[in-house]
Image: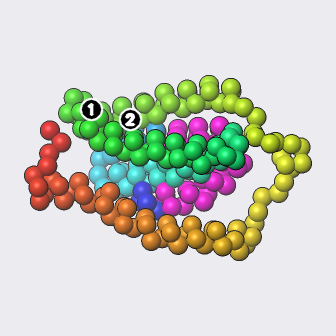
Amino acid sequence: AFVLAYTIMFAAGGWLVDRLGTVRGLALSVAVWSMASAGHALAAGALGLGVARFILGLGEGACFPAATKGAVEWFPPHQRGLAIGIAIGGSAFGSVLAPPLTAWMAGRFGWRGAFLATGALGAVWVAGWLFAGRLAPAPVGATPSRQSERNATWAEVFRQPAAWQILVARFLFDPVFYFYMFWIPQYLSRERGFSLD
């Protein structure tokens, strides 16, 4: 459920952020993500968990397109790679920091409390982001003619060789990445006796 929604929102989230703007689009994405995270605490079975995971994917999937759009809007071309790298690196750092922090919260407040706490942290982030967004600089190189440019059609996007290169790379990389991400914890627990305690 999570990966399906996440996949849908990579494209749909980019479209949404184009319509709402970077600040509001990312705020909405993280708000949905945070509410879904807190919603895991209400799950009473597989269906409830699946619904929470699906909504979590809807929120989280739009964040990477929004972060990339923000880098393009707010940084000159020679700094965009670094800005996107910091955003994606921050995500990777969060993936390393989250498991022990979540295990600590679950041990202290129970697994439902851990989900509520992560949802609350997301709500705090959204409030800070909306405040900071009021201070965001105007898009780099924005002119009336540039602001009125039309969006590319899907057909135009798929005629670009770079679009196919990205799609093929993700098609080959993502299954391996998600296999390790989803199954290594279970392997470490069952085969190696690893515990969160």
Q: Gap between marks 1 and 2, in whole Å?
A: 9 Å
**Residue type at mark 2?**
Thr
Q: Quadrant of the N terminus?
A: bottom left
| Disc assigned to residue 91 | none
Residue 140 % position (x, y) = 76, 40
What residue is pinned by disc 1?
105
Q: Pointer 2: residues within 10 angstroms few (<14), some, or many (20+)? A: many
What residue is pinned by disc 2?
118
Residue 144 % position (x, y) = 89, 43
Please name the residue shown 32% across and 64% down the image: 179
Left or right of 183 on screen, residue 74? right
Q: Nearer the viewer, residue 33 or 185?
A: 185
Please name the residue shown 61% across and 57% down the image: 12
Q: Quadrant of the C terminus?
A: top left
Left or right of 88 on screen, residue 191? left
Q: What is the basis of the colouring in this image?
A: rainbow
Q: Nearer the viewer, residue 59 or 42?
A: 59
Count of numbered marks: 2
Q: Which residues are magenta?
A: 5-33
Q: Residue furthest right?
A: 145
Judge whether 123 appears above or below 6 on screen: above
**Residue type at mark 1?**
Met
Please name the residue shown 45% across and 48% down the image: 56
Residue 40 % position (x, y) = 36, 43
| SS state under label 1 | helix
Q: Nearer the viewer, residue 146 or 112?
A: 146
Please name the residue shown 70% across and 47% down the image: 77
- Specify which label sits upstream in the sequence, 1 or 2: 1
